[in-house]
Amino acid sequence: MDPFALRCFAAVARTGSFSRAARELYRTQPAVSLQVRKLERELDRPLFERSRRSPVLTDAGRALLAGSRDLLERLDALPGLVASAADEPAGTLVL
């Protein structure tokens, strides 16, 4: 599962709009829609009910959102973990 597609899905779910999600992610609306459709094809389930108003999460979408929150938080934390590990000495050499 592509982390960027998951971020696009979560942004649409959070903002309630493909356009607002695109602005938040500094992408175009078609690019965000494409990523969400890619996830839907991969999971073989619709994640949103699309209407003229705002997209509404399906049961599958609600399940994915709940399961993806922790994963996305952990992905966001990785750069900090790597940076702090790089600041620590690699070990002690005793001669």
Image (spheres, helix red, strand yellow):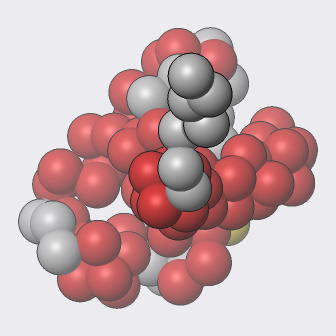
In depth, the one of 19 and 72 nearer the eye is 72
**Residue at the image position 76 percent from the left and 58 percent from the top:** 69
Residue found 63% across the figure and 18% down from its top: 43
Is 29 displayed left or right of 49 in the figure? Answer: left
Q: From where the camera sits, is residue 52 visible? A: no
- Expressed as whole percent of the image width and height from the top left, the position of residue 94 reads 62, 28
The answer to which image quadrant residue 70 occupies is bottom right
Q: What residue is shown at x 38% (from left), y 44% (from top)?
A: 4
Residue toward you, 48 or 2: 2
Quarter of the figure with the C terminus: top right
Q: Find residue 15 and report its horizontal and vertical position in percent.
A: 53, 83
The image shows residue 11, relative to residue 95, as above or below, that is below
Residue 81 is situated, as x and y percent measured from the top left of the image, at: 59, 56
Q: Nearer the viewer, residue 68 or 49?
A: 68
Q: Give the left or right position of residue 29, taking residue 84 as reference.
A: left
Residue 64: x and y in percent read 77, 42
Residue that lies at the very extreme toward the front in this rendered image: 95
Q: Is residue 30 left or right of residue 38?
A: left
Residue 59 appears in the rendering: yes
Count how many numbered circles sit on residues in the image: 0
Q: Is residue 5 left or right of residue 43?
A: left
* Front in this rendered view, residue 82 or 43: 82
The residue at the point 12 percent across, 65 percent down is 28
